[in-house]
Image (cartoon, rainbow, N blue to C red):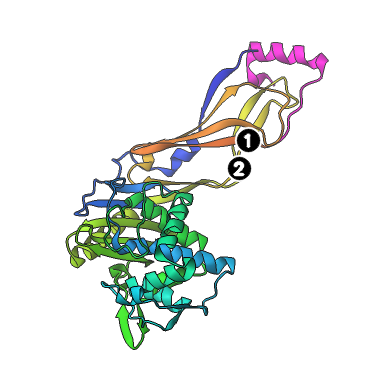
Amino acid sequence: MMLRPVRLVLLALLALAGPSIAPARAFETAAREAILIDDTTGTVLFEKNADQRMPPSSMSKMITVYMLFSRLAEGALSLDDTFPVSEKAWRKGGSKMFVEVGKRVRVEDLIQGIVVQSGNDAAIVAAEGMAGSEAAFVTELNTLAKRLGMTRSTFKNASGWPEEGHLTIARDLATLAHHTIHDFPQYYHYYGEKSFTYNGIRQGNRNPLLYRNAGADGLKTGHTQSGGYGLTASAVRDGRRLILVMNGLDSVRARARESERLLEYGFREFTNYTLFKAGDTVANADVWLGETATVPLVIGEDLVVTLARRARSEMTVTAVYQGPIPTPIKKGQRLATLRIVAPNTAPIERPLIAGRAVGKLAAFRRLEAAVSYLLWGPSAR
């Protein structure tokens, strides 16, 4: 028996589509670096210099907060624990929470002081409280960054204060945002707070999207002279979450305008399609000398794809395998590959497994079945 490549085009899925039209429209932004990602599928909807190293400014504070969230989740810290304020933290310039030297600050207040008020002083208090010194904390940050998959990031301090070599990329910040949202849903709400008052001083969150009808619920702004104005943001509409990172803008107004425009583009031009649920039979593959003529090809997990609304009509979905498949076949055995192809989208592939076991025919029936298959094909059985 000779195995042959088999490609089953699943035409039923194409009924999702209307007339053939062009893919998503091109988009331009004034941001120097940018990336927009569908959080569910990880599909990149837009990118511009997304792997170019850049100063992240106060967007760096997200990884300091991630460390705080980690310690809270582990039980090593509680929201009511306190850290002392050093003179170094008290003297730090730039945006401030206005902590007072020699006093102690609650961890929850520090989180809000970092997230809402973008306090450089608060970030240093947190770093020193967790690691003894900011330098020791930075060593931990860089180890954490690598573990999270932030492969192009190097941190030199806890706050994002301009320092030579303190660099990241937009793609890494999007990775950090994704982990923050999904690793610590119990604490993520702090990123959506619009204001926080500490020491009698009320300050508003600098994230412009929180004040617009954009579905935004976080994360963090940043600004330095060399990095320009930046924002890492996330928004949810109709259960679909997008993550946006942009940097290198020339003003607060441009940051607000461009971030809203890019999110609107992502929600308007793209959508998610659930093609299969876990356990669905995608196709039936021919079997060689088996107790049944076919075996169901099953997908093991939900398959959701993000496509441009204007591109889905050209989507093709195929099951690819070497067939007929020899027996015996074990349930759960990988047998085929599901392949989805659409314009301007990287091919998507998922394994297909046997939905049931198929035993080999008894010896006296194999010759009859083999001759029948060779003469008449699988339909003879």
Q: Inspect this view and state whether residue 264 appears.
A: yes
Quadrant (top left/top right/bottom left/bottom right) for the N terminus: top right
Residue 6 image position (x, y, % from top left): 54, 23
Numbered-mark total = 2
- Kindly state the secondary structure of the residue where label 1 is placed: strand
| Separation of residues labelled 2 and 1 (CA atoms) | 7 Å
Residue drawn at point x = 23 percent, y = 57 percent: 227
Residue drawn at point x = 32 percent, y = 52 percent: 170
What number is the disc on residue 353?
1
The answer to whether the residues at label 2 and label 1 have Cβ atoms under 8 Å apart is yes
- Decide which of 141, 231 is in the foreground and name it: 141
Mark 1, residues whose alpha carbon is within 10 Å: few (<14), some, or many (≥20)? many
Disc 2 residue type?
Gly
- Decide which of 74, 25 is in the foreground and name it: 74
Tell me if residue 353 is in the magenta stretch: no
Tell me if residue 379 is in the magenta stretch: yes
**Magenta residue span:** 356-381
Residue drawn at point x = 34 percent, y = 37 percent: 343
Residue 70 image position (x, y, % from top left): 52, 64
The overriding secondary structure of the stretch rendered in magenta is helix
Disc 1 residue type?
Ile
Task: Spot the residue most to the left.
Answer: 250
Residue 61: which quarter of the image? bottom left
236 relative to 7 in the view: left or right: left
- Disc nearer the start of the sequence (2/1): 2
What number is the disc on residue 300?
2
- Kindly state the secondary structure of the residue where label 2 is placed: loop
Residue 117 image position (x, y, % from top left): 33, 75
